[in-house]
Image: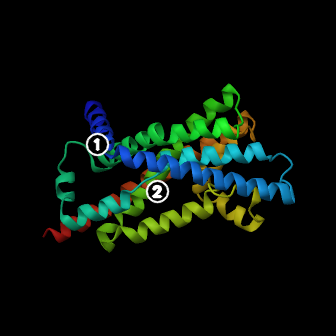
Amino acid sequence: MTGMYLALLSRTFRLQFQYRGETFFRIAGNIIRIYIQVCIWAALLGVSGAADGDVTLPDMVTYVAAAFVLRTLTRTTLAHKLADRVRDGSVAVDLIRPVPLIGYMFFEQLSENLFALVFSGLPVIIVSCAFWGLVLPSALNLALFILSALLAVLLMFYIEYIFGLFVFWIKNGTHMVMLVGGLFTVFSGATVPLWFYPPALAAVCEWLPFRLIAFEPISVYLGKYDAWQALRVILLQLVWAAVLIVSERLVWRAVQRRMFIQGG
């Protein structure tokens, strides 16, 4: 089974090389996007000062770069892919593969994201380091951040996959993509850190998993938490991962019952 997953990763990786021209435009677009965000934060912090005494402009530049890395790693198009497969009937082929559907889609998406990180994300980070400078973490914070980032990838995949499974009922993945994208933008802290959120909205974020995909891992990287607080973040990620895995199993069983009923 492991060999099948590695072969899938390799195949998807080779497929991405066919779009090399697109990669160059993606790099340029991402550099411009980060530059605009850095300028905005420089202006905001220069006018009003940091909202938190521990938040500085170098922190925010690093936050923007780290958020870009996490968005690249957690980006998913599962709802659209599932909707297309359901509409054209190719999902029937997916269901009889020796690899489970969820495993197939996870490694396919992971391969696409790793390709994007290496060939378009890494150049952007190098440019960010050269022009704006980034806060470098301690070895412990870096190790904890990597672990937290891996769990963030898992969390985002399961969230998107669970919402994507609803295309078996609604037949359109666009609405699911918009819903998940909106929830992530508002509650993850990827665009605006939760440090700057009003207390009421920040309290809502505490009860949702989206902050564990962006804000919390970046806070770990920046050293805003001590070791015990960082471990608490990772523990919360593990708890949410367990909740999402169980939820996915329940939704998948409902999908199987629906397919069985439709099949007679």
Query: Mark 1 Cα within 10 Å, few/some/many (few <14, many 20+)?
Result: few
Amino acid type of the residue that numbered disc 2 sits on in the rendered structure = Ile
Residue 104 shown left or right of residue 92 in the figure: right
Residue 259 in percent (x, y) is at 21, 65
Amino acid type of the residue that numbered disc 1 sits on in the rendered structure = Leu
- Assign a secondary structure to mark 2: helix
Camera-side mark, 2 or 1: 1
Residue 226 shown left or right of residue 114 in the figure: right
Earlier in the chain: of badge 2 and badge 1, it is 1
Vertical arrangement, residue 176 with respect to residue 244, above or below: below
At x 60%, y 48%, the residue is: 67
Residue 228 in percent (x, y) is at 72, 36
Camera-side residue of 53 and 224: 53
Q: Is residue 104 visible?
A: yes
- Assign a secondary structure to mark 1: helix
- The residue sitting at the top extreme is 139
Residue 43 shown left or right of residue 90 in the figure: right
Residue 189 in percent (x, y) is at 64, 56
Q: Is residue 241 visible?
A: no
Residue 160 in percent (x, y) is at 43, 57
Quarter containing the N terminus = top left
At x 67%, y 64%, the residue is: 204
Vertical arrangement, residue 236 with respect to residue 79, above or below: above
Q: What number is the disc on residue 15?
A: 1
Vertical arrangement, residue 132 with respect to residue 186, above or below: above
At x 70%, y 46%, the residue is: 61
Q: What number is the disc on residue 159?
A: 2
